[in-house]
Structures are given as C-alpha cells and as structure tokens.
Image (cartoon, helix red, strand yellow):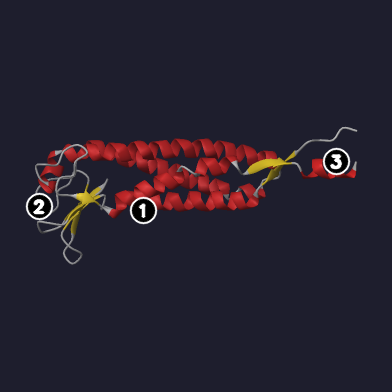
Amino acid sequence: MKVRGWTWATSWPVVALWASVTLLVALASLAALFTPTWFVRHSPSPPVMFGVWAWCVGGFDDQRCAAVGQSVSGSDGALPSAVWVMVGALYGGGGTLLAVTGLSALVAPVLPTTHARAALAHVAGNIQAAAVSLQAVALVLYPLGLGSPFARMQCGETASVYAAGSCELGYAYMLALVATVLAAYCPVLARLVTYKDYTDYWSNLNYM
C-alpha cells in the first residue's frame, strides 16, 4: 500500500505574527518618514531638527517648521530637495508596500485552500523583500545630504557627506533604521506560512 508522505498545511500562529509584524513596521516606517527629527542640533540656540520632507527651528513653545525647499521664517537656508526627496520617495514607497502586504496578510484566513495562502505569501514575501531593499537604500542615501550648504549652515562647516558635524542622529532616523531591520524578517515569516505536514504519514505507518 502506498502511503502519501505529506500534505501542505497552514501555520496560523505564523500568519498572525507575519501580519502583525508587517503592519507594525509599516506604521513605524511611515511615522518615522513624516517626523522631522532624523538629525538634531541642540546648540547653539535655537535648536534645529530636520528630516526627509520638513525641518523645524525652535523649541516646543515657539517651533517653526517648513517643507522641503522652503525656508523657515526668520531663519536662513532651506531643506535641500534633490537627495532627500528621493529618499522620501524610496523610503515612503517601501513603507507603503509593507502596509499593503500587511493588509493582504489579513486576507489569508478567508482564502479557501492552503495552496492559495501559499501563493499569497510567496508573492507578498517577494514584495516585502523589495520594500526592505528600497528602505535600506534610502537610509544609506540620506546622509549624502549632510554635504549640502543647508547641512553645513545648520551643523557647522565640519558637516559633510556621512559626517553630521555638530548635529546628531535623531530618534526618527533610529526608528526608521529599527523598522527596516525588523521588516527584513517579514519575507522570512512569509515563507513559513505554509509547511509540510507529515502527521498522516506517521499515523499510517504506525497503523501498518
């Protein structure tokens, strides 16, 4: 008698973990993207903070902010638009892809077959791998803007590409970095959504 060796099965705890992690890192990525504290200068006063699409001058009581390419009232300089707009597009695109795949992971329980869930996880996992790559490239490109006249004006003449001068890393850049590192686990979890179940095989062997 021929005994089938295995069948495909769905790991529901992995599905739940995959969807949760994907959505959390997507939200963290998008929150970091829109927070203008990728680099911060605390002194001399007033403090200055800048991110991908906006920068701010002053404390919480009298803070003034402006978007890319605009100068803050009463301050010199404007956030450079070339490199950092590209960073925003790459990192934001990666975060959006993660959010879409996270929502698609929530569809897995309503799919009728294990093969359909495996196909969904395979496609979503590949998209997530591409999203993580986009975010990693964006994080590497962002410090290129530190060599701009704006960065040297705000962070001192010692500021240059990959050297922040008197500025320091802000929490938004660190949040973006941590979110990208955690997002790298999402394609791995997608591969573990389905697995080979040998239960029937061993049960039949024991019966024989």
Whole-angstrom CA distance, mark 1 to mark 3, is 54 Å
Which residue matches tag 3?
Answer: 205
What's the amino acid at mark 1?
Answer: Ala
Q: Position of residue 36 (x, y in %)?
A: 26, 52
Whole-angstrom CA distance, mark 2 to mark 1, is 26 Å
Judge whether 56 appears above or below 188 on screen: below
Residue 135 in sight = yes
Q: Is mark 2 on a helix, strand or loop?
A: loop
As rendered, which of 6 and 202 lies closer to the eye? 202
> Which is more N-terminal, label 3 or label 1?
1
> Which is more N-terminal, label 1 or label 2?
1
Residue pictured at 60% horizontal, 42% vertical: 192
Q: Where is residue 75 in the image (x, y as percent from the top left)?
A: 10, 52
In the rendered image, which quarter is residue 204 located in?
top right
Which residue matches tag 1?
Answer: 31
Q: Nearer the viewer, mark 2 or mark 1?
A: 1
Residue pictured at 35% horizontal, 46% vertical: 177
Residue pictured at 37% horizontal, 43% vertical: 92
What's the amino acid at mark 2?
Answer: Ser
Q: What element carries label 3?
A: helix
Which residue matches tag 2?
Answer: 75
